[in-house]
Image (spheres, rainbow, N blue to C red):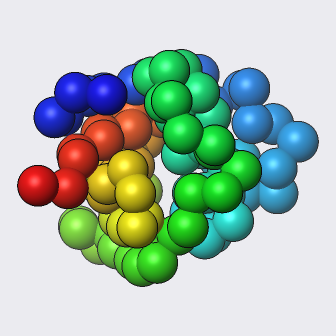
């Protein structure tokens, strides 16, 4: 996988998860990241990706579209997850140097 890559999903594909359209639980973030790794053709075993850090913040009060989730893994790297205003989830992958 490259240095920095992005993946965009329609949030509807995660409609069976309780956090679909509703915040970023750690479990929801991991589910999205695993789906992103698959789409990015990650050559490791996705089921063995070890998640180490998780943080969720609303950057601007009362602006749900400013919610950002940050997740670190041992390998392959770290991720930012955000929603836009048209029901997309944007995942930004960054590799460890």
Q: Could you say which is closer to the camera, residue 10 or residue 36?
A: 36
Which image quarter holds the C terminus?
bottom left
Residue 92 at what x, y percent from top left?
Answer: 30, 39
Q: Is residue 30 left or right of residue 90?
A: right
Vertical relation: 16 (above or below) 29: above
Residue 1 at what x, y percent from top left?
Answer: 31, 28
Q: Is residue 78 left or right of residue 40?
A: left
Which residue appears at 22% of the width and 27% of the height?
2
Q: Is residue 76 left or right of residue 43?
A: left
Q: How many marks?
A: 0
Q: Quadrant of residue 44?
A: top right
Q: Quadrant of residue 32?
A: top right
Vertical relation: 64 (above or below) 87: below
Q: Quadrant of residue 61?
A: bottom left
Residue 52 at what x, y percent from top left?
Answer: 46, 78
Vertical relation: 88 (above or below) 57: above
Q: Could you say which is closer to the camera, residue 65 or residue 13?
A: 13
Residue 56 in view in this figure? no
Residue 50 in view in this figure? yes
Which residue appears at 18% of the width and 34% of the height?
4
Residue 64 at what x, y percent from top left?
Answer: 42, 56
Q: Residue furthest left?
A: 97
Vertical relation: 4 (above or below) 47: above
């Amino acid at each position: 996988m490259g240095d920095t890559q992005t993946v965009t999903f329609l949030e509807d594909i995660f409609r069976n998860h309780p956090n679909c359209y509703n915040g970023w639980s750690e479990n929801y973030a991991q589910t999205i990241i695993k789906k992103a790794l698959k789409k990015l053709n990650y050559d490791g075993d996705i089921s063995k990706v070890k998640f180490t850090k998780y943080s969720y913040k609303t950057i601007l009060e009362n602006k749900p579209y400013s919610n950002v989730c940050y997740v670190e893994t041992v390998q392959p790297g770290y991720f930012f997850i955000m929603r836009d205003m048209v029901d997309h989830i944007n995942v930004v992958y960054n590799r460890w140097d």
